[in-house]
């Protein structure tokens, strides 16, 4: 790739001719297919922004100017042009992040990977530039999907207010989130898309009139001045212009010359301006273009020639949920489903196929999804809102004040709960069992295997007067973990083998196999352990305190933040019951975790069987002064592998 390897930074683009830029675009597409096929990643979105990214970095001079990306999953080309071309460990420990990363580059700003925030960032940076009189432009790229998020419109409302504050908003319109983008906005963008002819008409007219002496220029200015009227005539009135935002477009998002011209015009405009670019997700790669589901939005390792997956994953948590939803839909016609632009990733595609009228894709609008769910429940239905755990964070107030306050029977199914790893800090589902603890009436289930997903989903949708939550991990679901007994509403997974057991080990959700491993390791130290799975972690089961009282120490293990998680709730329940048994809670430390595999992150934070067994051994030894129990014996056990 003779041209790409010569690009060490954005300024190296300046010396390339248009033909060379087109060649560079081809080299980048070849690179993306070759490299992302090996690692997995957001291949489709990045294939769609090759020319756009090149043009942006030729017109805006990063890092002095700020080039901002909404969500950031489409920033691979940006990375290639800003000195990062080793994708061999993309999204892996020690390798490039799958999103912008300030630690990686001065060209990167927003790392959050949560959609619809770029315009807020841009508004703030533009305000700071104006107040501090910084000579710096801001260009914010937002996808048509991210534009369906409410925060984007809150920002636009503010941005439109300051006519003299320079800010370039680039709408990367490829007509899709994963699936085709939904809603009124999508329809509006579509009509604007059809005004493509209008832009060509105006460009041709300008060209002719520029060559017409004397009357030409004033006539063009009149035409251009009448643009609003003219555009009304040719195309529906742009909502962006209704907001008072200058609108440029639609522009062919794969024509570098046209893009540069539009972006340069926008940069000179001196106020907020929208450049509406038409792009194609998966462009230049047939397997992506033929992928109707999501144009290879996020792929695992694939064969570059065919796009077929290399490692076929077995049954995963998501498909277990999806299959049970179809059965529930057959049994109960009041059950409806909600997704926030992620129908297939959350496993609702089969339900949607079977019951097309009973599934609602609200766009990337989790807050609206939660409130709409309250409305659906009020209207006599039982909505199941399937969403990634980390994305529910932004709808906390709606869960609290719309669903719970009104005692609505809504079920939230949180996929990707716990450590997910490779998508970095913002994608770990590590906060749900903390933030939801404070929601009065809400009941929270953490199933340990496929059978429990099915059972607890059914228990959840049977609750009609409060929000219920079922949360499970990403990826393959492990083997069934049978119960050997029941205490209250809790499953006993392992009896202690004595009537004076040392440890009560409270195992939460998918960590059950690891907790059984911990009990085995403790057993080798002569420490007897009862392992229970509470199943419903909120509220804490009434049998927990009396059970704890029969043990010398309580240990909780959860794939959630330690702060305010299940361990905290159990400790509070023991205190409330006057049970004064020492408790050690193991979970995720309250810090942002760099991208790595799930197993690597769990090992890094000490959430492994040997680590926990070692600490519990020490704790029990200290309890009775038995220092002869060394932790060495547990070192012999290999940590749990993913
Ligand atoms: C709050 C939030 N919800 C859901 C997602 C999952 N997600 C990642 S990218 C994406 C689609 C984005 O579509 P668009 O903005 O059009 O970008 P494109 O991929 O088309 O370039 C979604 C839903 C997210 N990152 N953040
Ligand atoms: C960027 C984004 O939020 C999603 O595309 C996410 O990366 C997908 O995650 P999964 O691969 O776990 O479905
Ligand atoms: Mg899109």
Image (cartoon, helix red, strand yellow):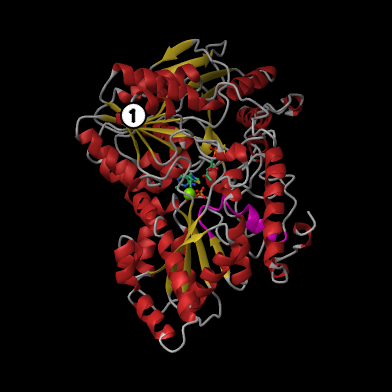
Q: Which residues are magenta?
A: 69-83
Front one among 219 and 642: 219
- The quarter holding residue 528 reads top right
Front one among 203 and 256: 203
Front one among 371 and 357: 357
**Relative side of 2 to 364, left or right:** right
The C terminus is located in which quarter?
top right
Q: Is residue 575 magenta?
A: no
Measured as percent of width and height from the top left, residue 629 is found at: 71, 25
View extreme (bottom): residue: 214
- Which quarter of the frame holds ligand 2? top right
Measured as percent of width and height from the top left, residue 308 is found at: 64, 30
**Relative side of 78 to 430, left or right:** right
Q: Is residue 79 magenta?
A: yes
Residue 183 in view in this figure = yes
Measured as percent of width and height from the top left, residue 111 is found at: 56, 55
Q: Which residue is mark 1?
A: 356
Dot 1, how many residues are within 10 Å of its Cα: few (below 14), some (14-19), or many (20+)?
few
- The quarter holding residue 410 reads top left
Measured as percent of width and height from the top left, residue 38 is found at: 71, 38
Give the residue at x 61% y 39%: 286
Q: Measured along the vertical axis of the image, is residue 315 above or below residue 201?
A: above
Q: Measured along the vertical axis of the image, is residue 502 above or below residue 167?
A: above
Front one among 435 and 117: 117
Q: Measured along the vertical axis of the image, is residue 388 above or below residue 66?
A: above
């Amino acid at each position: 790739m003779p041209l790409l390897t010569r690009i060490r930074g954005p300024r190296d683009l300046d010396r390339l001719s248009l033909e060379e830029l087109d060649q560079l675009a081809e080299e980048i597409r070849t690179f993306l297919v070759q490299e992302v096929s090996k690692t997995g990643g957001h291949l489709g979105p990045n294939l769609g922004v090759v020319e756009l990214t090149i043009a942006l970095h030729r017109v805006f001079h990063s890092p002095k100017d700020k080039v901002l990306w909404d969500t950031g999953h489409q920033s691979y080309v940006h990375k290639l042009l800003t000195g990062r071309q080793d994708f061999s460990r993309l999204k892996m420990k020690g390798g490039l992040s799958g999103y912008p990363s300030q630690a990686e580059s001065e060209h990167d700003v927003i790392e959050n990977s949560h959609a619809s925030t770029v315009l807020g960032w841009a508004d703030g940076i533009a305000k700071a530039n104006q107040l501090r009189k910084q000579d710096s432009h801001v260009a914010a790229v937002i996808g048509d999907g991210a534009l369906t998020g409410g925060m984007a419109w809150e920002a636009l409302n503010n941005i439109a207010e300051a006519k003299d504050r320079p800010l370039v908003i680039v709408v990367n319109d490829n007509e899709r989130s994963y699936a085709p983008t939904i809603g009124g906005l999508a329809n509006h963008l579509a009509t604007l898309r059809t005004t493509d002819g209008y832009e060509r008409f105006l460009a041709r007219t300008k060209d002719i009139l520029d060559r017409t002496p004397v009357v030409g220029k004033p006539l063009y200015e009149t035409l251009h001045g009448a643009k609003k009227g003219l555009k009304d005539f040719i195309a529906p009135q742009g909502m962006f212009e209704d907001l008072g935002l200058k609108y440029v477009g639609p522009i062919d998002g794969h024509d570098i010359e046209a893009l540069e011209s539009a972006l340069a015009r926008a940069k000179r405009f001196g106020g907020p301006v929208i450049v509406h670019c038409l792009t194609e997700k998966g462009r230049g790669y047939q397997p992506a273009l033929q992928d109707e589901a999501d144009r290879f939005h996020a792929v695992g390792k694939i064969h570059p020639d065919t796009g077929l997956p290399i490692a076929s994953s077995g049954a995963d948590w998501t498909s277990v949920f999806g299959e049970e939803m179809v059965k529930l839909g057959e049994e109960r016609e009041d059950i409806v489903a909600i997704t926030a632009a992620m129908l297939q990733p959350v496993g609702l595609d089969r339900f949607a196929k079977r019951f097309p009228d009973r599934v609602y894709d609200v766009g990337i609008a989790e807050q609206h999804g939660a409130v709409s769910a309250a409305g659906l429940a009020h209207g006599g239905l039982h909505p199941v809102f399937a969403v990634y755990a980390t994305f529910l964070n932004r709808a906390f107030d709606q869960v609290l004040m719309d669903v719970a306050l009104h005692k609505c029977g809504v079920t939230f199914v949180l996929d990707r709960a716990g450590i997910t790893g490779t998508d970095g800090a913002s994608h770990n589902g590590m906060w749900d069992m903390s933030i939801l603890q404070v929601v009065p009436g809400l009941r929270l289930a953490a199933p340990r295997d496929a059978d429990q997903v099915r059972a607890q989903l059914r228990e959840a949708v049977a609750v009609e007067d409060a929000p219920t939550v079922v949360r499970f991990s990403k990826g393959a679901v492990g083997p069934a973990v049978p119960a050997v007994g029941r205490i209250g509403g809790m499953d006993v997974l392992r009896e202690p083998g004595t009537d004076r057991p040392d440890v009560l080990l409270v195992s939460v959700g998918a960590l059950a196999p690891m907790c059984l491993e911990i009990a085995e390791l403790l057993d080798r130290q002569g420490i007897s352990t009862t392992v229970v799975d509470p199943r419903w972690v909120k509220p804490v089961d009434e049998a927990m305190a009396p059970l704890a009282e029969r043990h010398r120490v309580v240990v909780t293990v959860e794939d959630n933040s330690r702060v305010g998680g299940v361990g905290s709730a159990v400790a509070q329940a023991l205190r409330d019951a006057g049970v004064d048994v020492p408790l050690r809670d193991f979970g995720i430390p309250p810090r942002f975790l760099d991208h790595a595999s799930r197993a690597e992150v769990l090992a890094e934070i000490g959430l492994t069987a040997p680590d926990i067994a070692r600490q519990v051994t020490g704790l029990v030894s200290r309890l009775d002064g038995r220092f002869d129990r060394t932790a060495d014996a547990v070192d012999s056990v290999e940590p749990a592998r993913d």
